[in-house]
Structure formats: C-alpha cells, structure tokens
Amino acid sequence: MRRVFAYLTKERCIDPEIVSHFVHAKAIYEDAKYHNVIFVGHDENGVARFACKRGTASYAASGFKRDVAGSDKRYGFSHAGKSGKLYVFEAPIDLLAYISLHKQNWQQESYLALGGVSDRTLLHFLEQHSNVSSVCLCLDNDRAGLEAIQRIGQALRENGYIVTAHVSHYKDWNQQLQETCRMRDQHIQKPEQTLRL
C-alpha cells in the first residue's frame, strides 16, 4: 500500500485517516503488479462486485483510469452510514476529498461514487438502503456535472426524496481539497457553492 497511500495522501491531499478507514474496509487496495489504486464497490453481503483502477504514476489529466473487467456497474465505491442522508459524487477521489474537507461525524452519513454521471448506481443504492430520504448531489462543477444534477435531482424529487446540491468552487472536490491545502498557509478560503434546485 506504500505507493497508493503516498499518492492519495500526498498528491491528492486525502486525509490519511480517511484512506486508512477505506483500506481496512477492503474498499481501497494497491495493484501488486502496476501499483494502481483500486477502488472497490461491495454488494449488500460485502462481496466485491465492482472495481476501478486509477494510475498512481502520474497526476496528468490523461492518467490511467479503467473499470476492472466483469464489474457490475450497479455497485459503486461507497460508505453506508445509519443516517438518512446520502452524498453522491462522480468519482471515488472526489468522495474521499469531500469527506476530508467535512470530517466531523462523517461515518454517520452515506457516500456513493457513480463512476460518471449515470444514475444507475445511485438508483440501485437507494433500493438497497431504504433509510435514505435525503440526497445531496456533489457532482463536478462542469457542464456534464451540472446537467446531471438537474436531471437526477428532478427524478429523485419525483420519487419523494429531499434533494440538495453542493458544488465545489473549483472543477471538482479533489481540486477544492488540493487548493485548500495549498492556500492553508496563506489563510485564504474559497467559498463552496450551494445550489437551489
């Protein structure tokens, strides 16, 4: 786990305690051959059903990303808490970044990475977690993410869910976390954006 831990905590600025939690939950591990970080989605019985790879060698925008063959897209990288609130992200890295920025009592809430902007993973998660009544869409602050917030938000409201959106001031939550870390010494803080739906 040495390279993955360094990549997530140093390069991506994810809180080490958050990384350790997901590692112990068997939701993050390091590919022995190529040292990719593997994010795992489990079913209701704790069986791994989905995995995606992310290269750790470079933080270039074109860095290696791929779903593992045979993955079931109904399952995503997630944490299921006991409260009725679910936070939804496009990617596992943004999920981890958001928790790093909002650590207080985070384990009580639920978090889910969609692996894009399709609602398939979300709908399956909601079927399996009837305690969820409120969904906060934390998708990317770009055209695809903002359009998905409107589309998914409308569908959720029609099905009786309370829907809010929390959008990073930057393109995504990991960029916000990295900028927060970078500017911490300068005592500068960019505000987050809460959208009214």
Image (tube, rainbow, N blue to C red):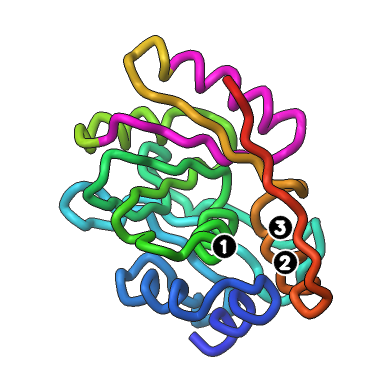
- Residue 133, position as x, y percentages in the image: 29, 30
> Residue at the bottom extreme?
2
Crowding at dot 2, Cα within 10 Å, few <14 / some 14-19 / many 20+, comes out as some
**Which residue in the rendered view is the most extreme toward the front?**
187
Q: What is the CA distance from the residue labelled 2 to the residue labelled 3?
A: 6 Å
In x, y percent, where is residue 196? 60, 24
Q: Quadrant of the C terminus?
A: top right
Q: Which residue is mark 2?
A: 180
Q: Above or below — where is 112 with respect to 105?
A: above
- Residue stretch in magenta: 132-155
**Residue 72 image-quadrant placement:** top left
N-term-proximal mark, 3 vs 1:
1
Q: Which residue is mark 3?
A: 176
The secondary structure type at the circle numbered 3 is: helix
Q: The residue under label 2 is which amino acid type?
A: Thr
Residue at 66 percent across and 81 percent down: it is 10
Compared across the picture, whether 142 is left or right of 73 comes to right
How far apart, in angstroms, are the residues tagged by discs 2 and 1?
9 Å
- Given residues 95 and 66, the one toward you in this image is 95
Up-down: is 143 above or below 92? above
Q: Amino acid at mark 1?
A: Leu
Q: Is residue 77 above or below residue 157?
A: below
The crowd level at tag 1 (other Cα within 10 Å; few <14, some 14-19, many 20+) is some
> What residue would you read off at disc 1?
101
